[in-house]
Every structure is written in C-alpha cells, then in structure tokens.
C-alpha cells in the first residue's frame, strides 16, 4: 500500500510539473490572443514608416497586410510580394517578449530572385534559396534594444529561423523550420 501511495504522489507531482511547464510557454501564446495586433515598420532604405493593425477580432486585415507588403517590398526593383502573415506574428511576439513596442527597422524584407542573385555575387552571407524570395524572412533591428537581447528573445520564441549578424547590426527572422546560426 505504501508503494502505491509513493507512485501516486510521484505521478501527481509530475503532472503538476507539466502544468507549470505549460505556463512557461504561455506568454508568447497569450500575446497572440490579443484582440488587436499592430506593428510599426520603418524601411531604412526607402525611409518609409508605417503603423498598422494586421489582426483584429480573430482575422488578418487585408489593408494592414497590404501596407506591410508594400513597405517590405524589394526596393531595388520596386517589386511587391505577399509577406507570410506568420512573420508579422513573429515580430509581434518578439516585441511582446522584449516588453518593447515601437519601431521595427527593416534592413531587408522581400527580395526578388534577381536581387537575391545580385546580393549573392557581392556577399557570402546570402542563401541561394533564401526565404526572403518567398516573403518569409526579414532582417531587422529594434532601436534601443541591444542586438544580443533581440537574438536571445527571438531564440526563446522557438518559431522559425534566427540568424545573428552582429558585425552588420541586424537579426534575421523567418517562418521556416526552427533553427539558428551566427
């Protein structure tokens, strides 16, 4: 009888531990349940700054997404491409994790295949099959937040790819598989 009580106690303690563990991941999920998701984006190459809601009452907003698609376009070729809405969710979660709303500075958003090929010729750090060409990646920084802190928060989200480029002063985020480099 004593053995069964010990096993039951261990089981209940284990289940309690799982309950606590599930709460640890909740802040990121909780922020996605907010009724309105809004971002402020600043494209450093074009100087464009926009603030828009991209999610309200359980739905992505076409107008906000269209605005973000434009500001994240391939400015070299003036080509607009649909950006994966999950990327905006990642940015929203990142700001929530950091406790920092405000401007997100865009170094690179969408890249056309021609722009990506040109950048690959001039730099060793550009992937041949970059997710930028699919509208699933952004290179960014957050003013006033140390780059290492942004990287740490992005890694803690455990969603998509996180690249760290301290010598170029930006973080890469994408909606691909969870991985990191740099």
Image (spheres, rainbow, N blue to C red):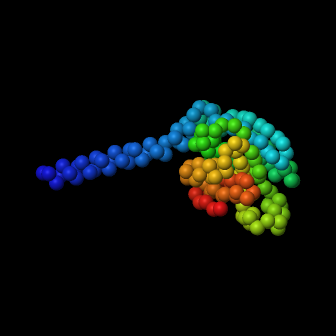
Q: Is residue 66 above or below residue 84?
A: above
Give how far across and how far down residue 169 sits, in percent: 73, 54
The quadrant holding residue 34 is top right
Give how far across and how far down residue 149 sits, in percent: 62, 49
- Image side of residue 36 versus residue 46, left or right: left
The quadrant holding residue 56 is top right
Quadrant holding the C terminus: bottom right
Residue at image point 66% right, 37% down:
101
Give how far across and how far down residue 142 sits, in percent: 70, 45
Q: Is residue 61 above or below residue 74?
A: above
Judging depth in this view, the residue of 22 and 168 nearest the camera is 168
Look at the image and tell me whether residue 175 can be seen.
no
Counting labels gives 0
Judging depth in this view, the residue of 143 and 80 nearest the camera is 143
Residue at image point 64% right, 36% down:
37
Look at the image and tell me whether residue 44 can be seen.
yes
Give how far across and how far down residue 58 sits, in percent: 59, 35
């Amino acid at each position: 009888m004593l053995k069964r009580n010990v096993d039951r106690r261990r089981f209940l303690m284990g289940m309690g531990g799982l309950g606590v563990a599930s709460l640890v991941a909740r802040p990121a999920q909780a922020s996605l349940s907010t009724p309105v998701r809004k971002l402020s984006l600043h494209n450093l190459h074009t100087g464009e700054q926009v603030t828009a809601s991209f999610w309200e009452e359980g739905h992505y907003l076409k107008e906000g997404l269209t605005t973000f698609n434009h500001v994240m376009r391939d400015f070299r070729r003036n080509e607009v491409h649909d950006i994966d809405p999950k990327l905006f969710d990642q940015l929203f979660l990142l700001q929530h994790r950091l406790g920092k709303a405000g401007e997100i500075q865009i170094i690179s958003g969408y890249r056309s295949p021609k722009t990506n090929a040109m950048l690959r010729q001039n730099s060793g750090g550009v992937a041949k099959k970059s997710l930028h060409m699919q509208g699933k990646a952004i290179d960014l920084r957050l003013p006033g937040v140390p780059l290492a802190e942004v990287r740490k928060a992005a890694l803690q989200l455990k969603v998509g790819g996180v690249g760290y480029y301290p010598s170029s002063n930006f973080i890469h985020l994408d909606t691909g598989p969870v991985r990191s480099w740099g």
